[in-house]
Amino acid sequence: MAISRFSYANLRVMDLPKAVKHYTETVGLRLVESDDQRAYFQADECQDHHCLIVSLSDRAGIDHVGFKVNDPSDLVEAAEAAAAHGLAVRDVPLGEIAGQGPGVMITLPSEHNMLLFYHADKIGYAGGMHNPTPGVSKNKIGAKVTHLDHTLLSCENAQPTVDFLTKVFDFSLTEKVVDPGGNLIAAFLTCTNTMHDLALGPGPNGTFHHMAFGMHSRGEVLEGVDILKEDEVPTLEYGVSRHGIAGVTTIYFHDPSGNRNEFYNGAYQAAGKPDLVPPIVWDVENFPRGAFYYENQIPETFFDEVT
Amino acid sequence: MGLKHRGILRIAYVRLGLNDIRLTQSLNFYRDRFGMLESMRDSERAYLRCWHETFQYNLVLEQTAENQLIEIGFHVRDEEDLDHLTNKIEVAGIQVEQSAANEPLNGMGRSISFTIPGGQRLRLFADMAQSGYVTGFESPDWVTPRELRGTAAPMFLNHVGLTSADPGATIDFLSDVLGFGLSEKIVSEDGKRLSGLMFRMCRDVGGQELAIFPGEDGHLHHIAFTKEDPNDILVIGQYLREDGINIDSYGPTKQSYGNTFSLHFFDNFGIRLELCCGGRNIDAHPESEPVIWDESELSKALSYYDADVNPGFLDHSL
């Protein structure tokens, strides 16, 4: 069948206890399990084992992104298709990553590792799977994130990765930013019906720009900003904003190792098949409005700061 | 070859037949007060779309002798899906009608239609004309168009509620034959399925494209549209009330069943409409597990904020 979910990001962090504190007490994720090398987290309104893994390392950045397929035979097919495309592929056996089945790791042209797998253990929604109480408990600590929404990875030239993901892995391109020569600067790709599961922006190959956590309302994004400020988490200088691209409410901030996070609320919907709807095209002149709708300019640090 | 999103990709439209001469009353409601864009009109029908939608219609209105739900349309990937699903539906013992492009609706490719066990008619197609985004495709402002501000201005068609004498049979057909997933269900004390939320799309405001409720076969329970968040819905409730539109006695509420923030109200033909945001986060995967509700928790399921079950809420509205 197909790639059916952006399941998780595996980030590298330099201080595991600080990362655990940030992602639970500030971001509001559930800590699912941890040891002295790794910690696994899930958002309240997701039923799989994790949406974030942080691994202890000597530098920040992205280890890999995990996507789920909805047929076990997809793994073989994806590995063969990626190898035929000249990409490095390796098997990831059961047990290498907690809470999920075996998978295949593919190195994209952008030098990011993408792990495909079929099975995720279930921990259920935070409210339970039986007569659940909706909303968030008054005892919850941290922001009211509901799910991992998307990630933006940086690379020198997004085009080969976009070509591979759309032609071979059936991702759809919803919006893109192009320079006057028609070259791709940024691309927004989805394997579901959301605006983007995976985006690619400018920067050194293999680097990480941000991962975004969804919320149910703009009010909750604002409450999230209050929590960030109270916890003295460094945020983008603009504070809360709106992306012209996608038209969503947003704030960026950093984890203690410098990996960028985002809180996000929006309802944009994509058709679900590549090339069914032509992509929205942003030109360079309008890109600042696309990135930060209210402020209409992009801070210098925004694309320079990647991990 | 796999690695392709096959079968039903998206919910596309609802087609209503209304006893409404020249569609005057219904256009007054859906276009002028509810805030949909009129994409096209022919001698028989009006075709309306939500403002964030590029495809030509999410709602088709046509004049008929009696008010009725005519059909619900779903977009599939390609012609191969149409052939594959035709075969599956026929193997399930249900007759499939084949229609040529632009028959019966304009702007649509070849299609198939059939009656599901609950008595409603569905139509599947692979091609639909696009009006294009009202914002344009170049560096757009993703902002509610000026002419729609002050109306409900829905972003997308979200889901359609149907009533069914045997909800279990309808749920099984939608799952086994059409490939829908089940995000939530309500079960009776003796284990019968009373209701199910069925989905194909994975998105922010997700978890259902068809909601199956107990009741008479062949009827429409409600039509739901997407908004961005609860603040929008609260404000739009004010516009609707100011406009004299009949709002369901639940008022704005959190619907635990489906995990949405919702407001239900009625058009001028008595058809129940919903604006919703939020929704259940679930993926189209065989291992995804549904939320299960006991019938004894119906009040909490249907409206978390209201003390009692609204007695008319489970009635069909068309």
Image (cartoon, rainbow, N blue to C red):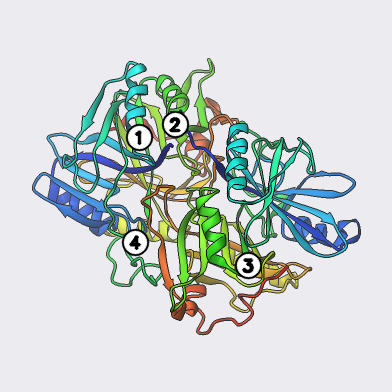
- N-terminal-most mark, 2 or 3: 2
Residue B111, percent from left and from top: 70, 40
For mark 3, name the chain. Answer: B
Q: Residue at label 1?
A: A73
Residue A175, percent from left and from top: 52, 33
**What's the CA distance linking mark 2 and mark 1?**
9 Å
Q: Quadrant of residue A210?
A: top left
Residue B122, percent from left and from top: 67, 51
Verify CB contact (< 8 Å) between mark 3 and mark 1. Answer: no
Q: Quadrant of residue B62?
A: bottom right
Q: Which mark is residue B2?
A: 2
**What's the CA distance linking mark 4 and mark 1?**
28 Å
Q: Are marks 2 and 3 on the same chain?
A: yes
**What's the CA distance linking mark 3 and mark 1?**
37 Å
Q: Amino acid at mark 3?
A: Thr
Q: Which mark is residue A125?
A: 4
- Rendered-image quadrant of the N terminus of chain A: top left
Q: Residue at label 3?
A: B163
Q: Residue furthest left?
A: A36
Q: Residue at x 63, y 64 (%)?
A: B162
Q: Amino acid at mark 1?
A: Ser
Describe the element under mark 4 as helix, strand or loop: loop
Q: Nearer the viewer, residue B180 or B58?
A: B180
Verify CB contact (< 8 Å) between mark 2 and mark 1. Answer: yes
Describe the element under mark 1 as helix, strand or loop: helix
Q: Amino acid at mark 2?
A: Gly
For mark 2, name the chain. Answer: B
Closer to viewer: mark 3 or mark 4? 3
Verify CB contact (< 8 Å) between mark 2 and mark 3. Answer: no
